[in-house]
Image (cartoon, helix red, strand yellow):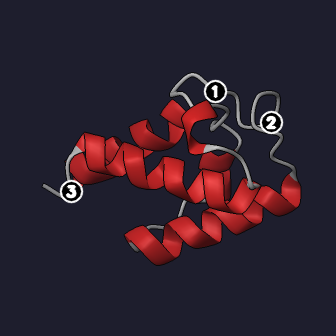
Amino acid sequence: MDKEQIEQKVKEILADRLDIDINKIELDSDLVDDLGMDSLGAVEVMYEIREKFGVDIPESELSRIEKVKDIIEYFKRIRNKNI
């Protein structure tokens, strides 16, 4: 899966779980301030990511994820470690 596919899938998950228009989601969108994600939404999004990608985002990483692009960057780091 390339970066564009990951980006699209992450946006789809966010749009579905946060009940927002996918076209309003940008890479620089802040998950809380721009997209309105609360703690329950974060749990739902992380569960869906685990289901779709087979990847857990540890709690230590969650505190660093503030924007949509942070999720994409996390996947890039994981993918590079597994190559």
- Looking at the image, residue 51 lies above or below residue 4: below
- Residue 29, numbered label: 1
Earlier in the chain: of badge 3 and badge 1, it is 3
Element carrying mark 3: loop
Q: Tell me where residue 29 sits by quadrant.
A: top right
Which one is nearer the viewer's eye here, 77 or 67? 67
Image point (25%, 52%), residue name: 79
Disc 3 and disc 2: Cα gap in Å? Answer: 27 Å
Disc 3 and disc 1: Cα gap in Å? Answer: 22 Å
10 Å crowding of disc 1: few (<14), some (14-19), many (20+): some
Element carrying mark 1: loop
Please name the residue that numbered disc 2 is placed on.
32
> Where is residue 71 shown, x and y percent of the image?
51, 43
Residue furthest toward the left?
83
> Where is residue 19 shown, x and y percent of the image?
74, 55
Please name the residue that numbered disc 3 is placed on.
1
Quadrant of the rendering where the C terminus is positioned = bottom left
10 Å crowding of disc 3: few (<14), some (14-19), many (20+): few
- Looking at the image, residue 81 lies above or below residue 55: above
- Looking at the image, residue 47 lies above or below residue 2: below
Dot 1 amino acid type = Ser
> Where is residue 4 shown, x and y percent of the image?
28, 41
10 Å crowding of disc 2: few (<14), some (14-19), many (20+): some
Quadrant of the rendering where the N terminus is positioned = bottom left
Dot 2 amino acid type = Val
